[in-house]
Image (spheres, rainbow, N blue to C red):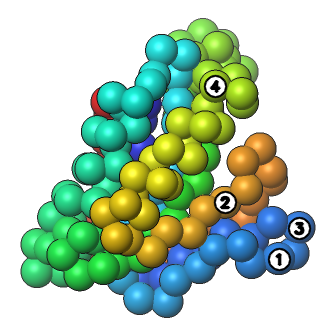
Amino acid sequence: MKAVLQRASRASVTVAGEVVAQFDRQGIVALVGVTHDDGAEQVDIIARKIAELRILNGELSASDVDAPVIVVSQFTLYADVKKGRRPSWNGAAPGPVAEPLVEGVVTALREFGLTVGTGVFGAHMDVELVGDGPITILVEA
């Protein structure tokens, strides 16, 4: 499992013209990708990193300041671009495997007490954010 964490001063996710998640104060946008052999252990590691990494102002974590988080499923994190010009998606887990694991990350973050918004799994999404810093961190479990 991989996650790209971006610190943002505001962010939103829109699907079919409807805003499905947003925040207007410092928070984290987490793009989460799942591969074939991921499971509960990777969910726990990724959720803990999202909640506890000290990447917000004052070296605080989302858990420290109840910062909002938006989680967006992102199978393209497992793109293989070694050959040619067309990415291979073979490393990404199929939807029936990935969706419950991404939901597991969301559930775990909520168990940390965080306010979590989400994209819509498998939908075309417009993800907007204002990068703060910018701070972008790749986490792998």
The amino acid sitting under disc 1 is: Glu
In the image, what residue occupies the spot 72% across and 30% down? 95
- The numbered dot on residue 97 is 4
User: In the rendered view, would you say 109 is above or below 57?
Assistant: above
Secondary-structure class at tag 1 = strand
User: In the rendered view, would you say 48 is above or below 42?
Assistant: below
| Residue 28, quarter of the rendered image | bottom left
Circles 4 and 3 in contact, beta carbons < 8 Å: no
The amino acid sitting under disc 2 is: Gly
Depth order, front residue of 40/8: 40
Circle nearer the N terminus (2, 4): 4
User: How many angstroms separate mark 1 from mark 2 (CA)?
Assistant: 11 Å
Secondary-structure class at tag 2 = loop
- Judged left or right of residue 122, residue 51 is left
Circle nearer the N terminus (1, 2): 1
Circles 1 and 3 in contact, beta carbons < 8 Å: yes
Quadrant where the image shows the N terminus: top left
User: How many angstroms separate mark 3 from mark 2 (CA)?
Assistant: 12 Å
Quadrant where the image shows the C terminus: top left
User: How many angstroms separate mark 4 from mark 3 (CA)?
Assistant: 25 Å
Circle nearer the N terminus (4, 3): 3
Q: Which residue is mark 1?
A: 18
Image coordinates for residue 55, horizontal then vertical, percent: 21, 66
